Amino acid sequence: MGIDPGTLITGYGIIDFKKNKFNPVCYGAVRNKSSDLISSRYLNIFNKLNKCIAKYSPDVVALEGQFVSKNVVSAFKLGQAKGIAVLCAAKNGIPAYEYQPKDIKQSVSGRGTAGKEQVAVMIRIILGLADVPKPQDASDALAAAICHCNNISNRVNIVKRI
Amino acid sequence: MGIDPGTLITGYGIIDFKKNKFNPVCYGAVRNKSSDLISSRYLNIFNKLNKCIAKYSPDVVALEGQFVSKNVVSAFKLGQAKGIAVLCAAKNGIPAYEYQPKDIKQSVSGRGTAGKEQVAVMIRIILGLADVPKPQDASDALAAAICHCNNISNRVNIVKRI
């Protein structure tokens, strides 16, 4: 299960990885309104992710490691949402791993500097989807999940358990 | 209940505020080791704060608003721990409020630029404690709680519900 945490939109995506083949299980996003209290948003993210984890029992959770953020305030907000996602994994006894954005891009598209749209197209192809997964946050979550599968199968040592 | 979140030490403090009088109920800290996985730390903070909330049923949770942080990485880490604290409040149906550091200092010591030790001494006096509360994180948590009580009783409009 990949998670792309955010206070307004938290993307998630679950994939099945067997014999080096990828199959999409489900993907989507937990949405909050900007008028919602921060505390309500976190509770909503926590409840929805827990529900999804209870339904599909993923083996691992993969997240993007360091968010690219220009200022302290937005890093702080993103950090809070990520804390909720990591807690959901821990609360359900699921190991969590994080990957750097460039490693996810590299793993999915072959290029560490690939654009978001390029990555989305590659995810569509890898998972055999009719369309590019929407929203972008769900696509980014699926990318983290694919990156983790590629890494454990190739035993590349860029896995960081958190 | 005041909470001062941190990934290594999360301070908490519960006070009873009736007829403009303060009484300490309990204070302490949730400690994690730097060798613990981040996910284990969050789960520990979540479990311990929930246990404390279940035991004392506080009416509100008060936190320091914007952490003073020089870089994006430390803001990100602090944000994650704060997310857990805010979630604990929300999960237990308790409203959470945040205050700026200078407002907490002003409220407790009368000076927005007071040092940490000055604030700690004032907390000892306000709560009628024999010693300055330790660790510093518990003292900071108590300061946030006192600040909230002062604000609601004085109806000063610097309360921000989150």
Image (cartoon, coloured by chain):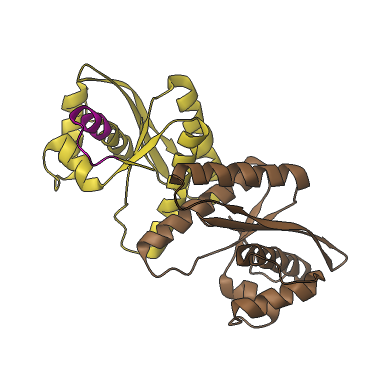
Chain colours: A brown, B yellow
**Direction top: furthest residue:** B19
Q: Where's residue B15, x and y in %?
A: 31, 24
Residue B116: x and y, percent?
A: 20, 43
Q: Magenta stretch: dominant SS? A: helix
Q: Nearer the viewer, residue A101 or A48?
A: A48
The verdict on residue B149 being magenta is: yes
In-image side of B22 versus B6 (left or right) = left
Quadrant in the rendering for residue A121? bottom right
Residue B153 falls in image quadrant? top left
The residue lying toward the viewer, choosing from A73 and B13, is A73
Q: Residue furthest right?
A: A19
Magenta region includes residue B12: no
Q: Residue at x 37, y 30 (%)?
A: B60
Instruction: Kindly identify the residue that appears in the image at 43 percent across and 21 percent down.
Output: B56
Q: Position of residue A122 (x, y in %)?
A: 72, 77
**What residue is shown at x 66% (from left), y 76% (from top)?**
A119
The range drawn in magenta is B147-159
Residue B149 placed where, x, y %?
25, 29
- Residue A34 visible somewhere in the drawing: yes
> In which quadrant of the rendered image does the N terminus of chain A lie?
bottom right
The structure residue drawn at horizontal position 70% and vertical position 71%, both measured from the top left corner, is: A156
